[in-house]
Amino acid sequence: MDIHSPGTTDSDSGADNVSELHNASVDEGAALQGACAQVHLPTGAMCIKRRGHDGSCEFVAARQVDVLLAERKTAEHW
């Protein structure tokens, strides 16, 4: 495809488009339980806040996710 064809702009190509650089990853099992489940790719840590939460994610180590997610769901009555 010609990069100068109608419907494309300089901001649509390559590294100029920030959305192409963002690689979102979500743990499917935790997401099905109602968690945000966003995974921090470099560390493997996962957010245990409720899906759609306000503010920043609360990342915990992968080995702690199951226990802490269960505790959070009980405490917050998910």
Image: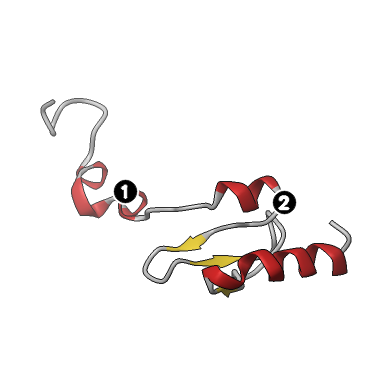
Identified at 41% across, 71% down, the residue is 43
Residue 46 figure quarter? bottom right
Rendered view: 11 above or below 61: above
Mark 1 lies on a secondary structure that is helix
Using the image, tell me which numbered label, if any, was put on residue 75: none
> How many numbered marks does the figure carry?
2
Q: What residue lies at 59% left-to-right and 65% top-to-bottom?
A: 47
Between the C-alphas of marks 2 and 1, the distance is 27 Å
Residue at 66 percent of width and 64 percent of height: 66
Q: Residues within 10 Å of mark 2 (few under 14, many from 20)?
A: some
Q: Mark 1: few, some, or many residues within 10 Å (few <14, many ≥20)? A: few
> Which residue is at 78% across, 69% downward?
71
| Mark number, residue 34 | 2
Q: Which residue is mark 1?
A: 20
Measured as percent of width and height from the top left, residue 33 is found at 71, 50
Above or below for 11 versus 69:
above
Along the viewing direction, whichever of 51 and 11 lies nearer the viewer: 51
From the viewer's perspective, tell me whether residue 70 is left or right of residue 5: right
Q: Give coordinates of residue 5: x percent, y percent.
A: 16, 26
The residue mark sitting in front, 2 or 1, is: 2
Q: Is residue 23 left or right of residue 35?
A: left
Observer-nearest residue: 20 or 12? 20
| Amino acid bearing label 2 | Gly
Residue closer to the observer: 78 or 53: 78
The amino acid type of the residue labelled 1 equals Glu
Whether residue 37 sits left or right of residue 69 in the image: it is left
Q: Quadrant of the N terminus?
A: top left
Horizontal placement of 15 versus 76: left or right? left
**Residue 8 spot, x, y in % from top left:** 23, 33
Residue 41 location, quadrant: bottom left
Q: Earlier in the sequence, mark 2 or mark 1?
A: 1
Q: Quadrant of the C terminus?
A: bottom right
